[in-house]
Image (cartoon, coloured by chain):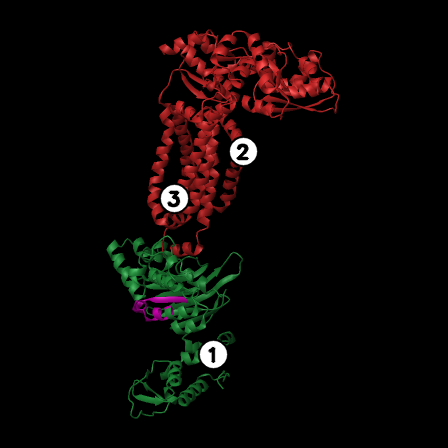
Chain colours: A red, B green
Amino acid sequence: MEDQPGFPEFVQQQAGKLLEQTLQHIGLTFISLLIAVVIGVPLGILITRRKKLAGIVLGIAGVLQTIPSIALLGFMIPLLGIGAKPAIMALFLYALLPIIRNTYTGILQVDPVVIDAATGMGMSKRQLLYRVQLPLAMPVLLAGIRTATVINVGVATLAAYIAAGGLGEFIFGGIALNNTNMILAGAIPAALLAIIFDWAVARLQKLRAQKVKTALYFLPFLLVILSSFYLLPAAYGSSLVAGFTPEFMGRKDGNLGLKQVYGLHMRTVVISDMIMYKAAYEKTLDVISGSTTDGRVRAFDLQALTDDKHIFPPYYAAPIVRQETLDKYPELAPALNKLSGIINDSVMTELNYRVDHLKQDPAAVASDFLKAKGLLQVAKHGTKGTVVIGAKIFGDGYILANMYKLLVNGYTELEATTKTGLGGTKICFDALTNGQIDLYPEYSGTGLLVILQADKSVVDTLISDNQKVYDYVSREFMQRYHIKWLPPIGFNNTYALMMRRQQAADLHITSISDLKEYLLHH
Amino acid sequence: MIKLEHVNKSFHNGKPAVRDVSFEVNTGETLVLLGTSGSGKTTTLRMINRLIAPDSGQILVNGESVNTQQTEALRRNIGYVLQDNGLFPHYTVAENIGIVPTLLKWDKKRIEERTRSLMEKLRLSVADHYDEYPQQLSGGQQQRVGLARALAADPAVLLMDEPFGALDPVTRASVRKEFRSLDEIHNKTVIMVTHDVPEAFELGNRICLMDKGAIQQTGTPAELLFNPVNDFVSNFFQEQRFWLELNALRLTDIRSWLSDTVPGENHAPVLKGEDSCWDALEQLTTLSAPVNILFNDKLVRIDTSELMHAFTQYKQTVSGHGRSTRLS
């Protein structure tokens, strides 16, 4: 962490990408805003005339607003796939409520005497709307657009989870990679965008109604121009589309390695691990950054490409524990070590398959497995102390954490609780060093490259030998963080590029080099 | 010309708001709809420009049923003044006045000329207020703009709903006076709603007194005072009866009870026969001396006791039922 470059240097290095993401972010925000205005304002006007509809329309828009943004994005995927469409749809739905509601209240709060005067003087409904109601409702209506803009700038960061780009790519990449500069490079521009747009609409609100008229003629053009930003970066492309997780994008043993070692350049979108496998299966993506033991590899019939130039180091999973906790409870380590050497690659894939695809409860899967291996003991409900077991948000973590919980409860007088779903290496590791959790399963390769961020020279000497990597991280972790690597569990969960089995066969691609060759000629 | 024939209106609660209302107002005449809150006077007014639809009955404006006319066109030919002026806060004074001419697609120059001339007539400084917004004006000025806006397209009919009701008494009196002296209203049919009795007497050629949705009596102020058709009508004016009576009676009405005293050295007439007894009393008490009145036939000189004597005589003759007054 100390040897990371400074924030200005990072921004300078990544200026191109930052600009691209910022433009995408603005584009996403304003396309959805534009649609929301085009649909929301007439809807708001309609419900001032048909009062019976008002409750229903505002109710539905209100309910949409309460759906957590990440879940709303999730709902959109089965309907619209991944990429810009579901992101825009979700952002549009979020922007809808403030726009409809403020149009509605803005028009209703116009002084009834003024409406009466306008009607009495012989204005038609249309003239009343355009000359009286809308101009007088404008400050309130603009306040709604202002709210919607700020909401959209914020929620648009989540678009990176479903391959729609935007500043969320840096933010999630940074969180996953324990790279503060990267997080800031996404978060600061996102915050600035929110502040700038908020300020700009606030200015518009304060203009006298007269001048607003002129300003409003420009607004649609401005919205369209800002919206079109999204299309600019999409101009380049290749015949195959890759979807990589934010973490993979920034890793030396990830996309950076692919570029440096293989010279592989392809159209790449950033996507959440949660939907990446399915997107590959549904042919939205052609190449993904999978992990070898993931159950969905089997479920969606994907094939891992051979890493013929060895850029993906071995990732032996082992529990890492605070030394403090081990000293306090000496009985803990033997209980955890009961799992050591028990689970190999295929077993882990099978377990993941049951959780990810067959939707079985991770706790039940863990318990069944221990029972089959004769390791399950009835919980002692000990009162000697509490051990908190963490796990990262994806893959193996859930199941392993549950197994450890059963082992601790069964073999010691300690009470174990789990804290799963920690969103990435950085969050998990920070929780461990802060003492919020006592242990979590980690991979040797991640320890080396992400947490220790070892020099290239060190990495090169170690990378080909599993044992050397494990020894190095054990030593360094103890020295630097006072954290103990217990013996490996047995399986090796490494990154791999994956394609649909059928497509890989059709294109005669079996290794990453084959893929690169194919892309050169197509 | 406006004519209502057996107009009825009930609202959702089923209670009749207007019951069998009929009246006729001629061009150049001002009819005041007078009554307490809930008497149905505003509902009656709003049915004329179709802001409210009657349940039954006929309403004719300039000889044509309002139902056969296109609503917007009808309203553009009817000036409409509201109690709370209803000026557009996002329009300047000039734009507010020009609303109806704009709807009627007058050309810009004509609208501007008309706006300037109306502002001058209503004593609104064009230089100061033309480009101001309503919020920058005083209450009296706002109401003047409301009046100018109603008159802008020179409509044949003017409907006024408590036009001076929101103003303080001093401002109200001055705006009212300006309204009365406007040449514009003399060729119009005016219907005004008010609950203010002195205002009704000052501005109305005829008064239509309403209660619980029905007309109690329609007639000149003097008719209502001296020939009330029922107790409601006579009780309605009880509070200010003396002042109202003096106000409602013109000097010509009591001419026959005045002596023919010819003025001596001072021949200058002070009052005319058309002036009210109240005007004469005011002059008499201000000057503390007899005043000259110019009737059609001759110039006559009266003093206070003579005026009050003739007034009392008139009342005894006209009101057969000898109702007592505050005059004692």
Q: Is residue B250 visible?
A: yes
Q: Amino acid at mark 2?
A: Ile
Name the mark nearer the viewer: 2 or 3: 3
- Label pair 2/1, CB-CB below 8 angstroms: no
- Decide which of A492, A350 is in the foreground and name it: A492
* Chain label for disc 3: A
List the single residue furthest toward the front.
A479
Secondary structure under the numbered disc 1 in the rendered image: helix
The quadrant of the image that shows the C terminus of chain A is top left
Same-subunit check for callouts 2 and 1: no
Q: Is residue A174 above or below residue A211?
A: above
Q: Is residue A424 visible?
A: no
Relative to A383, is A268 on the left or the right? Answer: left
Same-subunit check for callouts 3 and 1: no
Q: Magenta segment, which residues?
A: B175-192
Circle 3 packing at 10 Å, graded few (<14), some (14-19), many (20+), is: many
Give the residue pinned by disc 2.
A67
Query: Tag 3 or tag 2, which sits nearer the N-term?
Result: 2
Q: Which mark, residue B241?
A: 1
- Label pair 3/1, CB-CB below 8 angstroms: no
In the image, residue B55 lies at what x, y percent? 46, 58
Q: Amino acid at mark 1?
A: Arg
Q: Which mark, residue A204?
A: 3
Secondary structure under the numbered disc 3 in the rendered image: helix
> Is B182 covered by the magenta stretch?
yes
